[in-house]
Image: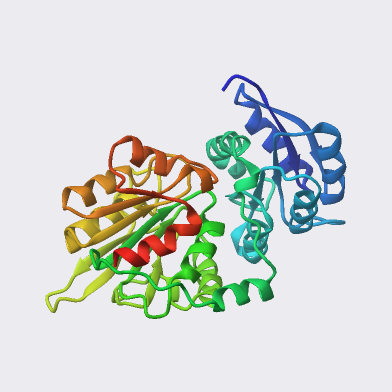
């Protein structure tokens, strides 16, 4: 990184503003150029200070976080990272992502305590990544009526190659928006189960799966211990637990949730899901690595390829962050690079 990034911090708590400024100042590449108490003040400062990235609380007087994201995106799209507490603001956080926010960091507590420093490294990493996001690639969801109309369209017929019996998907930054585009395009008669890992803080995955289910012909839900994988079902790994697949003596494949392995940077981990899918389904696996920072999914893709399975990656032109797919491509593990708008068709042709 060859320049110092300008950050605007928005929070109605003076303590949180001070602490977030301290946290970000630990990096020589970040400078907090301003702080705002609410969304209205933030809009003015964003215009004056021209920040590279904004961190934003959700619950604020005057204009809340969702209102600020919507209005800022209308005026001039900027990378906005939501900082919130899941128990209080889960619904609002998902709405802010739909409105164009690029990522979110979970505050450990609403109280003015030292606990907030625990998210320091994650926040610095996400702010740096957000600064490089081409805002033209950030999906802003259509209003519900339009989104519903889009999902009613029958998918185009495809020639099926029947190469895979399961689809496993790994995704991170930009994921909530991308999956809302991809999963509703899979038809009700899709012949294989789908299992997904998305890096999300604890407290959001069940709510997100429920929203995705409302928009999709397939059944989408957060995975539970012992769920039987079947055609027509999409399982999302719960935040904080690894999702693995196991074959029972009777032949059915079920979901298993575990906190171990502990040492991985992400829980759930794409690598863990992909490896278990390769062990259970052998060459009959399609692994899909989509937008996200880092390299989670690369080792898992290697397991799938070692068993003779297929690996697709989202192409750079539609990724919000071309990190995870790039790591798979550079390792020579991608069979096909596909833009987001063509991914559903590519998946349907493989199974």
> Would you say 10 lies left or right of 81 here?
right
> Would you say 284 lies left or right of 148 here?
left
Q: Residue at x 79, y 33 (%)?
A: 50
State the residue in front, 237 or 110: 237
Where in the figure is residue 59, as x and y percent of width and height? 75, 57
Q: Quadrant of the C terminus?
A: bottom left
State the residue in front, 37 or 110: 37
Where in the figure is residue 344, as x and y percent of width and height? 43, 63
> Would you say 129 lies left or right of 290 here?
right
Question: Image quadrant of residue 281?
Answer: bottom left
State the residue in front, 234 or 201: 234
| Camera sees residue 138 | yes
Count the marks: how many? 0
| Camera sees residue 237 | no
Where in the figure is residue 109, as x and y percent of width and height? 62, 52
Q: Furthest residue to the left? A: 249
Q: Residue at x 39, y 69 (%)?
A: 235
Q: Residue at x 53, y 40 (%)?
A: 122
Q: Quadrant of the N terminus?
A: top right
> Would you say 119 lies left or right of 271 here?
right
Q: Residue at x 64, y 46 (%)?
A: 136
Task: Say how the picture is coloured.
Answer: rainbow
Where in the figure is residue 21, as x and y percent of width and height? 70, 33
Q: Furthest residue to the top? A: 2
């Amino acid at each position: 990184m060859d320049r110092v990034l300008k950050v605007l911090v928005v929070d109605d708590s003076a303590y949180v503003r001070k602490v977030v400024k301290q946290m970000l100042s630990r990096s020589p590449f970040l400078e907090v150029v301003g702080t705002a108490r609410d969304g209205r003040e933030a809009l003015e400062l964003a215009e004056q200070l021209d920040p590279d990235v904004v961190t934003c609380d959700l619950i604020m007087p005057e204009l809340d976080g969702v209102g600020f994201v919507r209005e800022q995106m209308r005026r001039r799209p900027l990378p906005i990272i939501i900082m919130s507490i899941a128990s209080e603001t889960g619904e609002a956080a998902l709405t802010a992502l739909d409105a164009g926010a690029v990522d979110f960091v979970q505050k450990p507590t609403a109280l003015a305590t030292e606990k907030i420093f625990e998210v320091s490294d994650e926040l610095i990493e996400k702010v740096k990544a957000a600064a490089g996001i081409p805002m033209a690639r950030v999906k802003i969801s259509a209003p519900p009526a339009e989104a519903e109309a889009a999902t009613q369209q029958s998918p185009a017929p495809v020639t099926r190659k029947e190469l895979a019996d399961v689809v496993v998907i790994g995704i991170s930054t930009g994921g909530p928006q991308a999956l809302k585009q991809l999963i509703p395009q899979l038809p009700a008669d899709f012949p294989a189960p789908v299992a997904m890992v998305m890096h999300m803080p604890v407290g959001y995955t069940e709510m997100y799966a429920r929203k995705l289910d409302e928009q999709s012909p397939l059944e989408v839900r957060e995975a539970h211990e012992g769920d039987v994988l079947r055609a027509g079902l999409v399982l999302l790994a719960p935040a904080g637990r690894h999702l693995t697949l196991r074959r029972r003596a009777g032949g059915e494949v079920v979901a298993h949730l575990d906190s171990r392995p502990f040492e991985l940077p992400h829980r759930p981990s794409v690598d863990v899901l992909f490896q278990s899918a390769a062990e259970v389904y052998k060459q009959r696996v399609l692994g899909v690595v989509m937008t996200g920072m880092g390299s989670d999914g690369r080792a898992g893709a290697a397991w799938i390829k070692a068993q003779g399975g297929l690996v697709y990656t989202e192409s750079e032109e539609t990724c919000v962050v071309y990190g995870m797919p790039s790591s798979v491509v550079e390792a020579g593990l991608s069979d096909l690079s596909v833009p987001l708008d063509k991914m559903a068709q590519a998946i349907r042709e493989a199974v």
